[in-house]
């Protein structure tokens, strides 16, 4: 059996998930990997057969996506050519972790695709949604990487098709401690903006990770670091708490490590607004933006040692087995919840 596994390169959560999923897929058949995007900090430890620029959302400096930079870096003609030239005929199973080229090429080739991501879970009927509806954001999310069937990941299990997060082996092997500092990862904010506000919270030590630092430096109660997976894991494992965006990967790992957590969803990111809605429901403090008005809320969070308890079993094999069993060998699975298709189990 030939399998195509397509990975989105915006952010790091798709890649860390792929690191756990791919070895189990390789036990089921011959796996080719497709990677597209330009906004990740982690390299896949596998041979990539197809590597495309694709369509990435560019993080801005004011708490959200920079749509102008996203538009500037989008080469529509090249994207259409990549979709047109991707030959999917050899593949018996196509799995996409929110990767658009594979999905649109599959529509062109009239082949089924399996969506496997947090994004598809946020659209599930049982997933909490933000009170303020973003119809454009929801429309983009539905049509960015359209798939035939969906299996999702969320911060808690919703049903037989939406699972708890896949936690990478490196994180499962960490031994959490508390050395008193707070770990910060806010890639959608300007570094000076982060430092300006954290200086006001001078009673605490902050370790800030940023794409813009070549080497670390100390600024009063703040230590800055370049993006480095080993350093970040060490900081996260030994921290008192984590302040980050409401993306899926870092938040899931923080919850798994039983760390105190505060989330700031990126502006104009519908899936992060959905993530924030479920986090609020679970008891995780969420603020809309990093600004002076929210400093009292951050201080309140710092003074509160409450931890949100979760159980995230190692479920990668279970999910791969389920997908392969249900979508190979000529089986026909019914789908519902158009246009977000989740299998109906007979």
Image: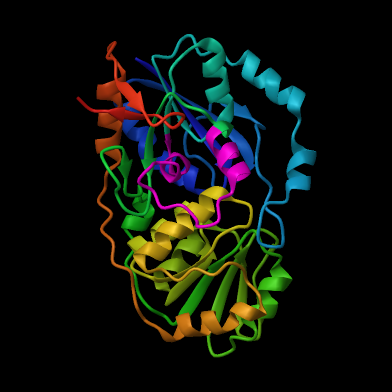
Q: Give the range drawn in magenta.
A: 116-142
Q: Residue 282 or 186: which is nearer the viewer?
A: 282
323 above or below 164?
above
| Quarter of image, res 293 | bottom right
Rendering coords of residue 213 (x, y %) = 69, 64
Please check the rendered image and state whether residue 301 is part of the magenta-colored stretch, yes or no.
no
Residue 328 as seen in the image, left or right of residue 232: left
Colour scheme:
rainbow
- Image quarter of the N terminus: top left
| Quarter of image, res 228 | bottom right
The residue sitting at 24% across, 37% down in the picture is 318
Residue 246 as seen in the image, left or right of residue 124: right
Rendering coords of residue 35 (x, y %) = 56, 32
Tell me, yes or no, if residue 256 can be seen here. yes
61 above or below 121?
below
Tell me, yes or no, if residue 49 can be seen here. no
* Total marks in image: 0
166 above or below 179?
above
The residue sitting at 60% across, 57% down in the picture is 266
Residue 184 as seen in the image, left or right of residue 74: left
């Amino acid at each position: 059996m030939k399998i195509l596994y397509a990975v989105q390169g915006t952010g790091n959560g798709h890649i860390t998930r792929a690191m756990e999923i791919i070895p189990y897929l390789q036990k089921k058949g011959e796996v080719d990997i497709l990677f597209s995007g330009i906004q990740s900090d982690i390299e896949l430890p596998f041979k990539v057969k197809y590597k495309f620029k694709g369509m990435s959302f560019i993080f801005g400096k004011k708490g959200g996506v920079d749509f102008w930079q996203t538009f500037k870096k989008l080469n529509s003609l090249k994207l259409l050519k990549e979709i047109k030239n991707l030959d999917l005929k050899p593949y018996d199973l196509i799995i996409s972790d929110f990767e658009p080229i594979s999905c649109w090429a599959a529509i062109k080739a009239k082949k089924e695709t399996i969506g496997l991501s947090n994004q598809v879970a946020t659209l599930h009927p049982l997933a909490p949604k933000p009170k303020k509806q973003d119809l454009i954001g929801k429309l983009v999310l539905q049509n960015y990487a359209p798939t035939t069937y969906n299996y999702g990941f969320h911060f808690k299990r919703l049903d037989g098709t939406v699972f708890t997060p896949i936690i990478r082996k490196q994180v499962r092997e960490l031994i959490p401690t508390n050395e008193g500092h707070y770990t910060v990862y806010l890639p959608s904010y300007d570094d000076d903006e982060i430092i300006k506000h954290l200086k006001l919270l001078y009673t605490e030590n902050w370790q800030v990770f940023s794409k813009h630092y070549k080497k670390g430096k100390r600024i009063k109660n703040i230590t800055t670091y370049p993006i480095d997976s080993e350093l970040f894991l060490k900081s996260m494992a030994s921290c008192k708490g984590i302040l980050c965006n409401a993306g899926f990967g870092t938040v899931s790992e923080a919850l798994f490590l039983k760390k105190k957590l505060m989330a700031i969803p990126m502006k104009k990111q519908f899936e992060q607004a959905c993530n924030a809605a479920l986090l609020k429901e679970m008891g995780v403090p969420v603020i809309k933006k990093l600004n002076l008005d929210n400093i009292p809320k951050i201080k309140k969070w710092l003074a509160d040692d409450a931890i949100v308890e979760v159980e995230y079993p190692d479920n990668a094999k279970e999910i791969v087995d389920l997908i392969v069993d249900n979508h190979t060998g000529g089986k026909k699975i019914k789908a519902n919840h158009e246009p977000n298709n989740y299998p109906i189990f007979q």
